[in-house]
Image (cartoon, rainbow, N blue to C red):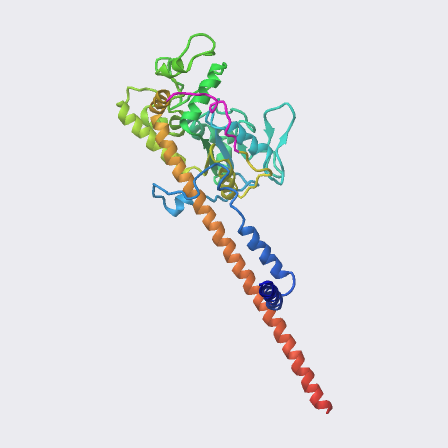
Amino acid sequence: MDDKSNKLLLALVMLFLFAVIVLQYVCPGTECQLLRLQAFHSSRADPYRTEDESPPRFVARLNFTDAELLRKVDFNIKGDDLIVFLHIQKTGGTTFGRHLVRNIQLEQPCECKAGQKKCTCHRPGKRETWLFSRFSTGWSCGLHADWTELTNCVPSIVDSKKEVKLRPSRNFYYITILRDPVSRYLSEWRHVQRGATWKASLHVCDGRSPTIEELPSCYTGDDWSGCSLKEFMDCPYNLANNRQVRMLSDLSLVGCYNLSVMPEEQRNKVLLDSAKENLKCMAFFGLTEFQRKTQYLFEKTFNMNFISPFTQYNNTRASSVEIDQQTQKRIEALNFLDMELYEYAKDLFLQRYQFTRQKDHQEARRKRQEQRKILKTRHAHKRDQTDNATSDYVEDVEKWR
């Protein structure tokens, strides 16, 4: 029995050595080592698959065209193009905003001084910014300006009338981050409970801010600190309700904050449809629950790489709030538009991720095939040279005889 085992082992070793010799003959040198290393790296576990606990196989519900799934913009940081970050409260926008100014590989990195929130993000060789965000330009269009405000305000802020004529090719690339509506709502409640008000928000629409009658306050006094979750949910004017839909839609389509312009059901449909369309047409959006995928899609969209990987924080203030099923359902009901928008956004986001990864794999496969062709051509050329040298030698020997 031992003899048979030893013979089998010896046969396997000989077979392995024979395979190595053949491989070295077919593909000598260090060139094939590169291919073997690439094959090893490509076979490693997908780093994006488990970091956010998403299902390994995502089944799409909605149909999008390739043009809607492929997000790759020719962002000209040295020219006039501008990235505009629409920062929705309690979506992780502060973390993402810091990534934009402190964690991106740039020819001319943003200058961030200790103790200061704002950084100077100039284009290479110019004294103007490529990024419109809280941490670069401040709240230039108002605190947490929404889509309606930004699209009307940003062009006039960055360009005078004279400059608009000189820069007809300037592109504005709008980006944002969304979050699970229940978690976002609880996080906003905790923030308000600690004294946040966002009183400085302008809510400008069609050239004016809403009146007190159009947008009543939920509290009297300086703030709403100490409010209970029930009090927070009971206020019918609370802007936390469906905040993400409101901030991503074109409010001028529904008469801004004047609720008497159209029936509530019609208003809700117009707002949701507008938010979905604006989100789909944005250059990029990410989801708080998918940090690494958000990083990956941003890098692929703008061809800009982050220095350090994003971190998935699942232990947040919202996650520490324990609510019963009845409260959960009520929050979902108060945010029914946000719930539908988020399901739409999640489906589109994960389809974009899968589509982009597939394109990456196809491109990597194409490059490997090209490398193999080059290696085969080189090997054939070397073999021909060797054969020619041998035949020349044989001919010379024949002559010498």
Q: Tell me if residue 143 comes above or below residue 42 in the rendering.
A: above
Left or right of 216? Residue 366 is: right
| Residue 220 figure quarter | top left
- Residue beneath the point at 35% across and 25% down: 332
Task: Estimate the x, y position of residue 261 in percent, counting from the top left.
Answer: 28, 22
Name the main secondary structure of what is drawn in magenta: loop
Residue 277 x/y as whole percent: 36, 36
Furthest residue in direction top, as rendered: 221
| Quadrant in which the C terminus appears | bottom right
Q: Quadrant of the N terminus?
A: bottom right
Q: Using the image, determine if residue 401 lies above or below residue 129.
A: below
Q: State yes or no: residue 309 in magenta.
A: no
| Count of all numbered marks drawn on residues in the image | 0
Left or right, 181 with respect to 92, comes to left
Q: What's the residue at 44%, 18% (across, down)?
A: 189
Residue 252 in the figure: left or right of residue 309: left
Where are the magenta residues, as a range? 312-324
Percent across and percent down for residue 30 are 65, 60
In this view of the protein, can residue 397 be seen by the observer? yes
